[in-house]
Image (cartoon, rainbow, N blue to C red):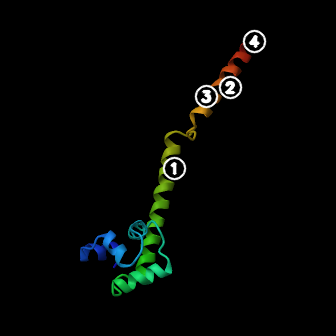
Amino acid sequence: MDLREYLFRKRIKITHFAKQINYGRTYVNEIVNGTRKPGKKLALCIEKETNGEVTLVSLLENFTKNKLESKSKKSSNERNQNFENPSLEPSKSPKTRKALKALGTKQKTANRI
C-alpha cells in the first residue's frame, strides 16, 4: 500500500502525520505525491509509524513511477511544442527584447544606405 492510500484509509491528514513522525509537512507532502525521494531514515520512520503497512519498497516504487511519468509528459510536451512551432524561441526579458529591436532597426537602416 502506498502512503497516500494509507493516509486516506485511516483518515489522517498529511499535517497530522508529519507531526507524528517529526518531519515537515512540505517534505511529507512531496513524499506522498512522489515528487521527492524519501531518505532512508524517513522511510524507516514511515514504515514504523504505519506498522509496516507502508513499506520502504512501496515508497520507492511510488517515487520511481512518478518520476518516469513526469519525464514522459515532459518529452511529449516538448515534441508537441516543437511540432506546432519549430522556430519557437525561449522567452526573453524586456531589456533583451528592446536591445534586439534596436539592433534590428540599425540593421534595416544600414541596408537602406
SS of the residue at dot 4? loop
Spatial CA distance of label 2 from label 3 is 9 Å
Q: Is residue 36 above or below residue 10?
A: above
Q: Residue under label 3, please give it.
A: 98
Q: Nearer the viewer, residue 61 or 53?
A: 53
Q: Are marks 3 and 4 in contact (CB under 8 Å)?
A: no
SS of the residue at dot 1? helix
Q: Residue under label 2, please give it.
A: 103
Quarter-of-image position of residue 65:
bottom left
Task: Tell me the kind of residue under disc 3.
Answer: Lys
Q: Residue under label 4, please give it.
A: 113
Q: Residue at x 27, y 72 (%)?
A: 8
In percent of width and height, residue 81 lies at 50, 45
Nearer-N-terminus badge (2/4): 2
As drawn, is 94 to the left or to the right of 110?
left
Mark 2 vs mark 3, foreground winner is 3
Spatial CA distance of label 1 from label 2 is 32 Å
Nearer-N-terminus badge (3/1): 1
Q: Is residue 11 above or below residue 85?
A: below
Q: Residue at x 40, y 70 (%)?
A: 28
Q: Residue under label 1, please give it.
A: 79
Nearer-N-terminus badge (1/2): 1
Task: Tell me the kind of residue under disc 4.
Answer: Ile
SS of the residue at dot 2? helix
